[in-house]
Image: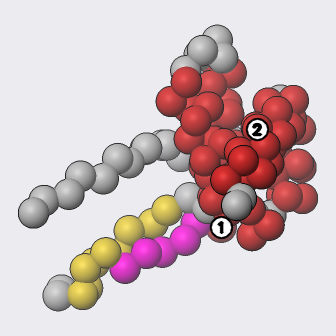
Amino acid sequence: MSAAVKVDVFLAGRDPFDQERLRLRERLLVSTAPPSWLWMDTAEHSVLRKLERYRRGGEVSERQWRDVVAVLRIQGSGIDSSHLDAWGGRLGVADLLERARDEAREGAKRRRP
């Protein structure tokens, strides 16, 4: 049986946010024989980049929005809210972030028995 994995690629530039992304990236072991590693953005950085992409695209991409809400819902209290707030403001997506959080909370409430 084969499986497919969807991956978003965000190229790193030279702006302060990209420098922060690189500094805080996470290393994931993807194969043990031979050992192979993949560097990944944190959940917070993925959310912020997707919100930027959503805004630049005219706020019409349901896929970007759905991804953001899903990450926020899955991460729950494990996400670094202060980091999101700080960068959300700097990147001009704080309003979208708040909307996405509201939607993630509502979705989580509906899923509870």
Say which residue appears at 38% left-offset and 48% top-offset.
Answer: 7
Residue denoted by label 1: 24
**Label of residue 103 in the image:** 2
Give the position of the N terminus as an image quadrant: bottom left
**Disc 2 on helix, strand or loop?**
helix
Is 105 situated left or right of 37 in this image?
Answer: right
Q: Position of residue 101 (x, y in %)?
A: 80, 44
The rendered magenta stretch, by its main secondary structure, is classed as strand
Please, is residue 38 above or below residue 29 in the view? above
Is 50 situated left or right of 82 in this image?
Answer: left
Query: Are the residues tagged 1 and 2 within 8 Å (C-beta)?
Result: no
> Does residue 36 show up?
yes
Say which residue appears at 71% left-offset and 59% top-offset.
Answer: 112
Give the position of the C terminus as an image quadrant: bottom right
Q: Residues within 10 Å of mark 1 (few under 14, many from 20)?
A: few
On whether residue 27 falls in the magenta region, the answer is yes
Tag 2: amino acid: Glu
Alpha-carbon span between mark 1 and mark 2:
27 Å
Please, is residue 10 above or below residue 28 in the view? above
Q: Nearer the viewer, residue 20 or 93?
A: 93
Say which residue appears at 56% left-offset and 58% top-offset.
Answer: 41
**Disc 1 on helix, strand or loop?**
helix
First to last magenta residue range:
25-29
Q: Position of residue 62 (x, y in %)?
A: 55, 24
